[in-house]
């Protein structure tokens, strides 16, 4: 428990630093327009050496949390669904979240606790069931389809004990990647793997993820991400050969340089992608991160631009036409249809 409290305090400290950076950006937001000009031409970056920068109107489609709108998120069932329906979902990149357990296993889970997506409160007799305090074996009693809602119903609610299928139980990062690589046929999926553990636990998760990826020689197909500044700094220094997205502070710095039209080379960015929100995921466009001008600026600096979580066809079409490189969505079939309509 002491280690967990320490990691929380460390994260709060880093969140404070990020908040200060946001406050410093406010004058820029108030004094400059941010709507973007729809007549701005898209500037192809044909000389890009960054493999995550895609051709115009052909962004990667990423199943966010393995397709959380069409199957229980971050479960083997969801990955099975993506692979079995590749022709209709059009997924190129699979996104999921990882955390470290009490016994050092790297499991898939978005929230810090199992409470929201499973029957954890019932199973453990309490709230706040943090992944870092529960072993993998203990977590196997959970039904990760408990609160999944589809067409107004909960198709997996109430499953307990032996009635819980294996593909709805807690799954490890190793198992998921091995399943995908063994069942993808000729297709090579890309991965976006976000570390959700914070502080010390996040650093342990980073080390474990690095081992999993390098043992399978997948470095060129995996982008790792985290919202925790301390974990981002750790991964940057300890595993610099692992392609990563910009940290929160780096993304703020990028936006500041873009809005001021400064030379980004002055800060020598080391990330390969911006993974940022848009539209309803970005405070209803209080800050518009999806303009052609900004995407052009990123591409000119050899940086890919990947957006979350796009569950609106209108937003998807806007980003496709503005030159986005990847669209993360809970509904990949919807985005796949939008991409096809633009060609």
Image (spheres, helix red, strand yellow):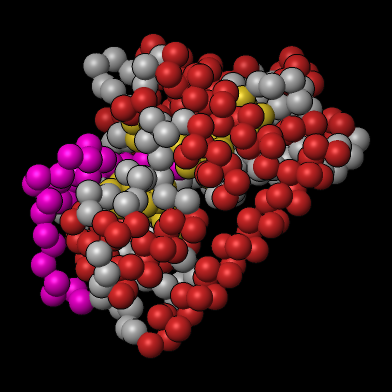
Answer above or below: position of 266 versus 333: below
Secondary structure predominantly adopted by residues drawn in magenta: loop
The magenta-colored residue range is 37-66
How many numbered marks are there?
0
Q: Residue furthest right?
A: 125
Using the rendered image of the protein, determine whether residue 66 is visible from the camera's viewpoint.
Answer: no
Left/right placement of residue 169 relative to residue 137 reads: left
For residue 39, above or below residue 334: below
Q: Quadrant of the N terminus?
A: top right
Front in this rendered view, residue 281 or 261 = 261
Above or below, 306 relative to 93: below
Above/below status of 297 relative to 161? below
- Residue at point 62% right, 17% down? 166
Residue 298 seen in the figure: yes
Rendered location of residue 107, percent (x, y): 62, 26
Q: Residue at x 43, y 19 (%)?
A: 214
Q: Pinpoint residue 334: horizontal percent, then vertical percent.
A: 34, 48
Could you tell whether 76 is left or right of 111 in the image? left
Q: Quadrant of residue 15?
A: bottom right
Residue at the spot 56% in from the left edge and 31% down from the top edge: 206
Can you give x and y, in whole percent of width and height, for residue 90 in the image?
29, 36
Q: Nearer the viewer, residue 116 or 216?
A: 216
Which of 30 and 339 lies nearest the eye of the viewer? 30
Indicate left or right for 150 with 295 as reference.
Answer: right
Quarter of the image holding residue 315?
Answer: bottom left
- Pick out the residue farthest to the bottom: 31
Give percent across and percent down for residue 216.
Answer: 41, 14
The residue depicted at 33 percent of the width and 68 percent of the height is 257
Q: Is residue 302 magenta?
A: no
Which residue is nearer to you in this view: 61 or 84?
Answer: 61
């Amino acid at each position: 428990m002491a280690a967990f409290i320490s990691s929380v305090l460390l994260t709060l400290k880093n969140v404070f630093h990020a908040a200060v950076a946001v406050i410093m950006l406010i004058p820029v937001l108030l004094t400059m327009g941010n709507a973007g000009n729809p007549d701005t031409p898209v500037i192809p970056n044909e000389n890009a050496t960054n493999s995550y920068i895609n051709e115009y109107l052909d962004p990667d489609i990423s199943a966010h949390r393995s397709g959380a709108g069409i199957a229980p998120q971050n479960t083997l069932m969801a990955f099975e669904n993506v692979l079995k329906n590749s022709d209709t979902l059009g997924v190129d990149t699979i996104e999921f979240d990882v955390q470290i357990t009490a016994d050092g296993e790297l499991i898939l889970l978005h929230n810090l606790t199992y409470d929201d997506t499973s029957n954890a409160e019932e199973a453990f007799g309490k709230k706040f069931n943090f992944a870092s305090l529960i072993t993998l074996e203990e977590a196997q009693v959970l039904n990760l389809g408990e609160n999944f809602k589809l067409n107004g119903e909960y198709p997996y609610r109430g499953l307990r004990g032996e009635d819980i299928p294996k593909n709805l139980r807690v799954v490890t990062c190793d198992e998921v990647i091995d399943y995908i690589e063994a069942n993808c046929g000729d297709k090579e999926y890309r991965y976006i793997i976000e570390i959700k553990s914070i502080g010390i636990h996040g650093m342990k998760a980073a080390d474990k993820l690095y081992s999993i990826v390098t043992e399978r020689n997948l470095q060129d197909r995996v982008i790792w991400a985290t919202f925790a500044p301390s974990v981002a700094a750790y991964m940057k220094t300890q595993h610099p050969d692992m392609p990563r997205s910009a940290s929160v502070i780096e993304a703020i710095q990028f936006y500041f340089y873009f809005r001021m039209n400064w030379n980004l080379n002055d800060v020598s960015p080391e990330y390969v992608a911006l993974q940022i929100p848009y539209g309803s995921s970005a405070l209803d466009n209080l800050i518009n991160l999806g303009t052609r001008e900004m995407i052009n600026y990123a591409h000119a600096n050899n940086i890919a631009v990947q957006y979350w979580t796009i569950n609106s066809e209108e937003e998807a079409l806007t980003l496709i036409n503005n030159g986005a490189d990847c669209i993360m969505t809970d509904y990949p079939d919807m985005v796949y249809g939008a991409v096809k309509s633009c060609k």
